[in-house]
Structures are given as C-alpha cells and as structure tokens.
Amino acid sequence: MKDSSEGAIVSRRQWLKTFLGLGAGLLVVHRGGLLAGSVDLDTARDEASQLIVRVSRPFDAETPVREFTSFLTPNHLFFVRSHFGPPSPETIGESQWTLRVGGAVERPKVFTMRSLRQFEPVTITAVLQCSGNGRAYHRPRVPGVQWERGAVGNAQWTGVRLRDVLQAAGIRAEARHVMFQGADRPVVNAVPLFARSIPLQKALHPDTLLAYEMNGHPLPLLHGAPLRAITPGWMAESCIKWLTHIEAREDEASGYFMQTAYRVPVKSAHTNTAVTGNETAPVEVMPIKSLIASPENGQSLEAGPVTIQGVAWAGETSIAKVEVSIDEGKTWRPTHLVGDDRLYAWRQWRFLWQATVQGTFTILCRATDERGDVQPAASSWNPSGFLWNGWDRVTVQVHP
Amino acid sequence: MMNASRSIGLFFVIGLVALTAITAFSQEDPASVMTMLGPRAEGLIIARCSVCHSADLITQQRLSGTRWETTIEKMKHWGAEISGQEADLLIRYLSARYHPDAPLNLPPLDHEMRKAEPFKDEPEAQGPARGVVLRGAGVFELNCQGCHGAGAMGGMGPKLAKNPILKHDELFRETVLYGRGPMPAWGSVLSEQDIADVHEWLLTR
C-alpha cells in the first residue's frame, strides 16, 4: 500500500519527458501512448502525472485513492487498463465508426454512431473495477499487473440499451450469450484477440449499455472511444472498449480471454470455499468492497477530530453499512452513509474520529451489503489474483 | 518385506540425489547471477519482450522460478522470439532478481533511456557498413515488422516506407541502436550490418 507509487510517478514523468522531447517524423509509437485522446501534449502530461503508472506500454495506470473523496471520478483521473492499448486515434472518428451485430440474430445489422443514437438514451452511474485491482496483496504473489487500490472508479455512463440494439437485430431462440469485440489489436498476431462474452440475461438487462459518453463528455480514447459496453455491477473486463462487433451465440466466446483468463475457481455459495477440481467460472459480479480515501496512508495528523471518509460498493446490490476499526479489527464502529444511494454506483461514507492520543494508528474499514455479505479481512487466494476485497487499511501518525 | 525395504531404500537414494541437485541449484548466488547475466538478460528483455510491452510489467513481478518459467513459456506461445538458451538465461536472471522475497523497490532497468549492452561478438566495423537490400528484407521481417507493419507500411509503430528519417543515415542508425521513446534499443540484437541492410531495403520501399 505504501510502496511503488511515487517511483512510478517519477519514472512516468521521465518517460514523458523523453516522449515529448521527440521531434516530428521520428520513430514515435502513437498507439498505446497517452497522447491519444487528449487535446494537447501539455494537458496529457499534466493529467497523466496524477495517475500511478503500472505499465507504460500498453498504458495501464491507477487512480490515487485520495481522489475517491469525490462521488464521480473525473475522466482524466479514471484508471486505465487494456491489453493492447487503444486503436490509433485517427480511426475512432464517430462519422467512420461502425458496429456490426451478427451471429444468432434474425437480421444482422451494421450501425453507425448516428443510427445508434436513434435509440433512447440512458444514463447510469456505475463503478468500473479491474478484476486484478488489489492483486499486489494476494499471497503467494501472482503474476500480472501489480494493482494496489486504485484500479476502480465511479462514473456516469450515457448510451443506449444493448437490449434495444439486440432486439432491432432480432435475437434467435438459440442465443444464450453475447460476445463483444473491440478494435484494439495485439502487436504480434500470435496473441489472441481480446474478446469476451456475457450471458444473454445480462445482455438483455435494461441497465446494460453501449455507452458513448463518460461523465457527460464523449468517451476519451483511453476509455474506449467512441463506443464501449457497460455491464453495471460487473467487473470491467466485460465492458469492452472500442466496440466494433457484437455476436449473439449459443455458447461462451471461445479464446484465451474468455476460456482461460478472467476466470476463478468455482466456489460453493454457502461455504465460500473452492471445491476440488479444476472447475472455473468467468469473473462477473463485483464482490463487496470499501476503501478509505482520506486520510491518506502515511499521513501525519494533528490530534483532534479527524474525518475518515471513503467509498463502498457491492456489485448488483446496495451497501447496508460501513464500519471502521482503529484496533486491528477487534472492535468496529459504524460510519455514516452519505450522498446518493444508487444501484451500481459506490456509496460514500464518513466517520468522525476523535484522535486524542498521539501515536501510530492503523485505520481499517469493511462494508456489508443488503444481502448480508461482509467484506473479509483478506480475500481467498486464486491463481490469477482476481477479486481482492480484503479490509482496506491506512496507517497514520497522530501528533500533539 | 525385502522388496518393500529395498524400494524404500531406492526412494531414499533418489530423494537424496534430487535434494542435492536442488540444493546445488538454489546455491547459485543471486548476486553473482545478476552480475554475470544482467547485461545480456536486460538486453534480451528489451529486444524480445518490450516489442509488446514495456519492461516495467516484468520488473514489478516477484515470482518463483517455476512461475517465471511458465510465464516465459506463455510468452513464447504468444509469439515472443525467445530461443531455448535465451529462455534458460532469462529464467535464471529473473528468478535471481525478481523472486518473491526481493524488495519491492529495486532500482529500475531504465531501459528505455539507455542502450542495452551488446552481447554479439561482432568485429569492429571498418567505416560505415554497406547495406544489402535482400538481406535487409529478411532482417526487417524478423525483427521490425511486428511494430512497423508488413512492407514497413506502419502498425503499432510508424510507417517507415518513405519516412524522412531514412535520409539521415546516422539518425536512423542511432535510433535503431539505442531506441527512442517507446521504441526499444536494438543494439543487443542487430549488428551494424543488419541495420545497414534494413536501411538499404527501406530506401527501396
């Protein structure tokens, strides 16, 4: 929780300096750079320097958790994750973009952005979170991007219902799954494409969207411009960016990113223990989780009243309560849930802590949802390091 | 009874041999492995891995030797041009430097800013190398096409056919040798002759 963040920011700046120092016409890779989608280089530099870079190419970066004192996460501070980086900026113009809908449908269709916008627009506030958020805390360690706490964000998504689009094409009776494919491509052909599918039931849910706006602005390139899927309450790998193809299918999408990656061992619903055998299921709904946005880890505080605040979310259900502990989980005290209570969005919470004693304190938080699911002290280990939702923890010093 | 105790004895011997082998392997001093293999391994990381992703994805991992081995296998399966010998070297180096108990803040490879150590024994060039077009086509296809596209028409990296940089021999050579921005340094993979050949071929595009 303390480690690499600063170093990553510094090296990112150095990298950008080199990157920005290039003259025109030189060997510049323009895909995967964060230049893309920003109006000018200075803006890109300022904005990116506020993210914690995990991988510089393809660009993966997380949001500093202190930004989560805000209900909505601004676009330029929203975490970025993709396997191959965005398609080149000149290919994503709204006027040239097409979305093909095919497979098990009566009438395969090609939509332009203009024709998509004929459907009823819908806006939903939803948390997006990388399945690997918190991977760095799994023990034994797991290979993959070592996300800590900030590969998550809450934004307003505007678009049209996937259901409306699918119904326009006419779903055939045999369809059980809906596959998404984006325009992003790997450098090397041997790498499989990033294609994922969701069950038909989720695809037909009225809250599942094809979004073209994020927080009231056109989708930025790094977030899937001009069109992406939004599966509220589910982990973000279903929210395919740069969406070009939708296919109704009888079975799950084939290929590595559906059949091997983004899967977890099947658990018994009652005991929460992995059953023996190799049975796995795709990562879908987000488990209950909460974060402490303020104070920050390592912060020095003056003795006196301290506002502890943060956010909590629970996939497809609401937050019932959030508690904090200052004694390593021996006792828990209820916090106040504040702000809007919207399904799929995160819920903000606050707690006034009377920090009268000086010393070093570790603050923990844990959330409980409407169904009674409680955030665990640590998540169960899984081979890909997904779905970390252990108690959040920050350590602070209180001075007189 | 006899048979049972004999096989127990056999198992014991096999176990002892295996244990000795494991101990010998794990006694490979990580510091000397890093010094010995570091330059070549870092060159390989740049040349073989950073075609698809920057080296920071590698250096943030803290994995056991077995995990490194499976990871490299996966990458080979996905098109990383790593020979068997290179894979062995990488596994030894990565397991020594990025093992589960290694500190989180190791000094960065800083690869994108500096040249990798050459590991080819090339004779010192006498004057500028003269390129051979046909050979250049092959070198390009093997090493450059992944990013710069078939026929040098551009891909993840820019189009090189008719690119203004081709008119500046020295700038072209330096860019290939030392890398620039997101492009990795190729000095550890391509010889002066290779670079001249690619240059010559690109001029025909």
Image: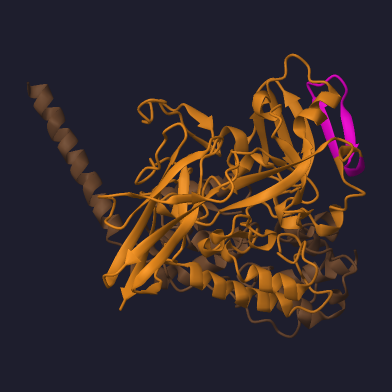
Chain colours: A orange, B brown
- Please state which of residues B16 and A201 is positioned toward the viewer in this rendering: A201
**Towards the viewer: A172 or A55:** A172
* Count of numbered badges drawn on the protein: 0
Which residue occupies the foreground of this view, A56 or A174? A174
Whether residue A98 is visible, yes or no, is yes
Say if the magenta span includes residue A168: no
Which span is picked out in magenta? A99-114
Front in this rendered view, residue A226 or A279: A226
Q: Quadrant of the N terminus of chain B?
A: top left
Taking the spot 32% from the left edge, 72% from the top edge, the residue there is: A398
Q: Is residue B139 left or right of residue B96?
A: right
The answer to which image quadrant residue A307 occupies is bottom left
Q: Residue furthest left?
A: B1
Determine whether B170 is above or below A93 in the image. Answer: below
Q: Work out whether residue B40 can be spotted.
A: no
- Residue at image x 82%, y 58%? A89
The residue sitting at the top extreme is A173
Residue B173: x, y in percent?
Answer: 74, 77
Give the quarter of the image for residue A383: top left
Q: Looking at the figure, which quarter contains the C terminus of chain B?
A: bottom right
Image location of residue A242, percent across then percent down: 76, 47
Q: Is residue A333 left or right of residue A21?
A: left
Residue B113 drawn at (x, y percent): 61, 77
Please, is residue A379 above or below residue B99 in the view? above
Residue drawn at 27 percent across, 61 percent down: B27
The answer to whether A224 appears left or right of A11 in the picture is right
Q: Position of residue B89 (x, y in %)?
A: 46, 59
Q: Is residue B85 left or right of residue A31?
A: left
Considering only vertical position in the picture, is A265 above or below A249? below
Q: Residue at x 46, y 54 (%)?
A: A291
